Amino acid sequence: MSTIAEKKEKVSVPFDYNKYLRPNKLPHIWCPGCGHGIVLKALLRAIDRAGLEKDNICMVSGIGCSSRTPGYVDFNTLHTLHGRAMAFATGVKLAKPELKVIVITGDGDALAIGGNHFIHACRRNIDMTVLVMTNSTYGMTGGQYSPTTPLDAIATTSRYGNIEPPFDACEMARASGATFVARGTAYHTIELERTIHDALVHKGTSIVDVIDACPTYFGRANKYKSATHMMELIEKDGTVNVKQAEKLPPEKLEGKVLRGVLHKVERPEYCEQYENLIMQKAAAKK
Amino acid sequence: MAQKKKRLLQGNEACVEGALYAGCRFYSGYPITPSTEVAEGMSVRLPKVGGKFIQMEDEIGGIAAAIGGSLAGLKSMTATSGPGFSLKQECIGYACIAEVPLVIVDVMRGGPATGYPTGPSQSDIMAAKWGTHGDHPVIAVTPSSVPEILTETVRAFNLAEKYRTPVMVLYDEIVGHMREPLTIPEPGELEVVDREKATCKPEEYFPYDDRHLVAPLAPFGSGYRFHVTGLNHKQDGFPTNDPKVIDRNNRRIIEKVETDKERIWKNEETALDDAEVAIFTIGSTARSARFAVNELRKSGLKVGLLRPLTIWPFPDAAVAELSKRVNAIVVPELNLGQMVHEVERCARGNCEVEALTRVDGEPITPAQIMHAVRKYL
Ligand SMILES: Cc1ncc(C[n+]2csc(CCOP(=O)(O)OP(=O)(O)O)c2C)c(N)n1
Ligand code: SF4
């Protein structure tokens, strides 16, 4: 395993983030050590790699720290209501299928208040790439437990330890019908960039669950020493790439969360199906 | 010109015709009685004109997707009733502050909660105005016949596009489900307003340009890259904490409707010239009221009817003026008294104001109205 310093070395190829940012909207609101900015950088590199045009990207988010991302990027950007990002995004995409729709949503936004929209977007297989920023807490409202908070973890609403079992966003996405399901972390930035790229070029609903850290709330409440300490324990030691996992004995996989592309299938995409319907109706008229 | 064919249509079907006439090309919603025929009709008709229909997972998704569709440049609509109207409220506020044109049809049924799904009601008048939190502009139109549902739906789209704001079409179950003959107007017969296009250079575009009460709205993906948020924002669309900007923007979105309300108001007056008693009502209740007026006039009694087709902004001026020349205004409504408070406010004690309410799921009859009116004659 390479160290963080080595990885930094590898990505230090000059990349012009400003090409995609709105520099006059910076500094961002995120705390030092927050994972959201690292994920944004990986996303921008993936967008560049996929050759997407700024005019053709519509980034939609809900409400939360993670959902502030669209404000900083130079695309068509839509910051909506808590939990509703995928529903707004469905409207944008269906109305204008030529747009590449990217949704940025927190784990609370996507899986609690927005859980129903999440399930049904996946079921429809409508073409959009969804980044679920899983920091296992409600960052914006000050550290309450979220649907991905582990059992026994401390939050401002689970002072005695969380008694609710957590969700696995990837399993839910897959069961709901998403045709591309992957997981990455803010620690494995190069792999994350590749994973997001693959999600962006996939046709259909692509879900990328990104494990990132909220050192301010989850970290402090659960006695992590620092943001990097959290990243090492949760993101580096707590996960294993799905390809590597194939070669590892079961005891080495215990308690580990899988990273990489976990599910990929082809299935008709919703907007294409709808366009077919319009074409059939037009042909019938002639 | 060939003789145009009259068709027998249901109110909710007329709503579909009105929406398509106005150029609606996006519908998203969730089925609920007594509005479902609107969704069914749109699902059949939209693909035939290259438009988009989607049945969402709930009413919140229904309106959220419609806002997205509108931002992508299509005239958009959602329709619902009672419980669904409650679910849509947060998104209605979003469309108000983000200034997204949108038509929301609410076919009113008995409430609260699941209430009386197949029973008529006019109990969402205040929910339409105050249902979403915070101060915000509201425009709501109130047709009372099948042909009028068509024309008022067209007008609702025009108002939504002109003022960049959600506009509600409120009618009760009776009007929504009744059938009346109707001639679909030819293209060009009714005015159709399209939203103002952005013409400036993309670098100079502000989605909430300070120089306008209503700024042009560029569709997403048209080369104007901008930000939309439900947070208080500056003219460039980005969030702000500046008290001056927050204050100005909160006031502006209301002013754009308030300062132009004479153009948004639309009232129908029946036999009001020499009236000693006036009836003020909307929707199906106005049909009973018109009957009552005719009957009472036959006996020489001086009764008239003021029927607003725009209930929000409330027709303040018309009611204030009327209150100075009648003894009483009777307000029949299918609720426990909503419009009556507005009438009282505008009448300022100039005349008696009395509510006539009914919430048993039955319509207010002409006989009930005649009885209420006679007291003041
Ligand atoms: C309808 C509604 N309910 C509650 C809130 C308050 N709220 C804002 S953000 C948030 C949770 C954010 O958590 P998450 O989505 O996980 O994103 P994070 O801030 O952790 O990135 C909540 C509960 C709201 N804005 N709207
Ligand atoms: S509170 Fe947590 S999630 Fe929000 S910006 Fe700070 S570290 Fe990030």
Image: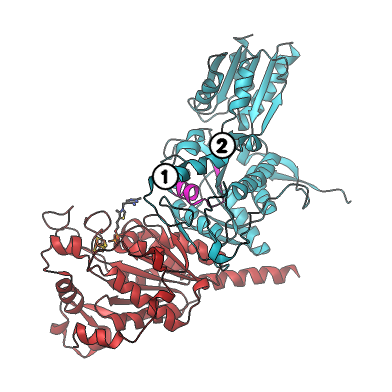
Chain colours: A red, B cyan
Q: Is residue A174 above or below residue B186?
A: below
State which mark lies toward you, 1 or 2: 1
Residue A279 falls left or right of residue A190: right
Residue placed under numbered mark 1 in the picture: B244
Residue B269: image location, x then y, percent = 70, 26
Contact check, label 1 and label 2, Cβ < 8 Å: no
Q: Is residue B118 above or below residue A204?
A: above
Residue A201 percent coordinates (x, y): 45, 80
Q: Quadrant of residue B363?
A: top right
Q: Which residue is mark 2?
A: B258
Q: What residue lies at 66% left-to-right and 54% top-to-bottom?
A: B194
Seen in the image, is A145 located left or right of residue A15?
left
Quadrant of picture, ligand 2: bottom left
What label sits on residue B262 in the rendered view? none
Highlighted magenta segment, given as a residue range:
B91-106
Residue placed most toward the observer, A184 or A246: A184
Q: Residue at x 71, y 24 (%)?
A: B270
Q: What kind of residue is marked 2?
A: Glu
Tag 1: residue type?
Answer: Lys
Using the image, determine if residue A282 lies above or below residue B284.
Answer: below
